[in-house]
Amino acid sequence: MNLQRIKGLISQYKKWLISPSKFDHLYLWESVEYFQKHFNLDEGDLAHHFDLALQNSSSKRLWTMEAKFPKEMMIAFMKMDADMARWTFKDLYRKENSLDGRLNRFQFHCDEMYAVWKKQHPKALHLGHYHDADHWMACVYLFLNFPDQFTPYDLSTLQNLLRFVEAKNIPQNEDPERFFKVLKVLDKFISDDEELQDLIFARLSEKHFKGKTLIPAYECALLAK
């Protein structure tokens, strides 16, 4: 990666943080705050607490897309088989295992739960469970639980970022592990800049998560075009 290009991207981020756009991603901090307060895999009514944990006063774009409602489908899984859903999340959150393995198993277990659910609801209009192989939702769940290690992820953002910093071997297939590694490089530059830290946290209010997150690095990555 080109160090000067990285520093240039950090400078773009600093300018972005004094523009009106600086409020665009505050829903990320709010979503983490809700999740950290309300989600507990050991709660008796898992579906209820999952519903409480996935809330936001300004945007639901993390878990609601056009014609896709992964939150609602996961709640259906939890109501159908709370133990299986609980185990699926615990496996996703098991840090000692490889990220690729955890993401692929999450997809597999969701496929399995959906197959059972579909047999129980053969006339349902749902076309799928929307926890697909692009790993968007699995990475969202990782981000909400471990905001200092993960962020939302999509391949196009990774590709744009790597092209911007003139990295070699731009991936054509999903590679979330590489994405988070590059974000941690950006995070090191961001964390070492006190002026930047002041601008980042000046935006936040009492409803926003105040702990360590990779959200600033993610915001920075989104500027790489």
Image (cartoon, rainbow, N blue to C red):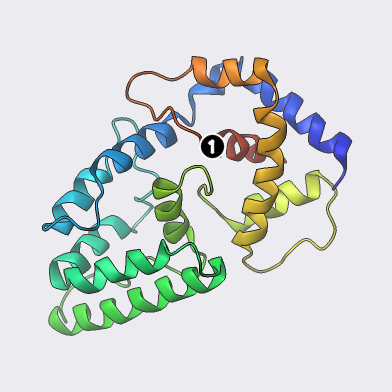
Count of numbered labels shown in the rendering: 1
- Residue 127's spot in the image, x, y percent? 31, 72
- Residue 7's spot in the image, x, y percent? 81, 31
User: In this image, 98 relative to 207: left or right?
Assistant: right
- Residue 144's spot in the image, x, y percent? 40, 46
120 over 179 or under it: above or below: below
The residue at the far front in this view is: 96
Indicate the quadrant where residue 31 lies.
Answer: top left
Indicate the quadrant where residue 18 lies.
Answer: top right
- Element type where label 1 sits in the image: helix
- Quarter of the image for the C terminus: give it: top right
- Residue 113's spot in the image, x, y percent? 27, 77
For image coordinates 38% across by 39% down, the residue present is 32
Residue that numbered label 1 is attached to: 215
Q: Amino acid at mark 1?
A: Ile
Indicate the quadrant where residue 79 lies.
Answer: bottom left
Q: Is residue 190 visible?
A: yes
User: In this image, 193 relative to 41: left or right?
Assistant: right
For image coordinates 52% across by 49% down, the residue present is 150
Q: Is residue 69 visible?
A: no
For image coordinates 44% across by 68% down, the residue present is 132
For image coordinates 33% across by 72% down, the residue present is 128
Say few, some or many: other residues with alpha carbon within 10 Å of mark 1 (under 14 / 14 to 19 / 20 or more). many
Quick one: 2 or 25, which is closer to the camera? 2
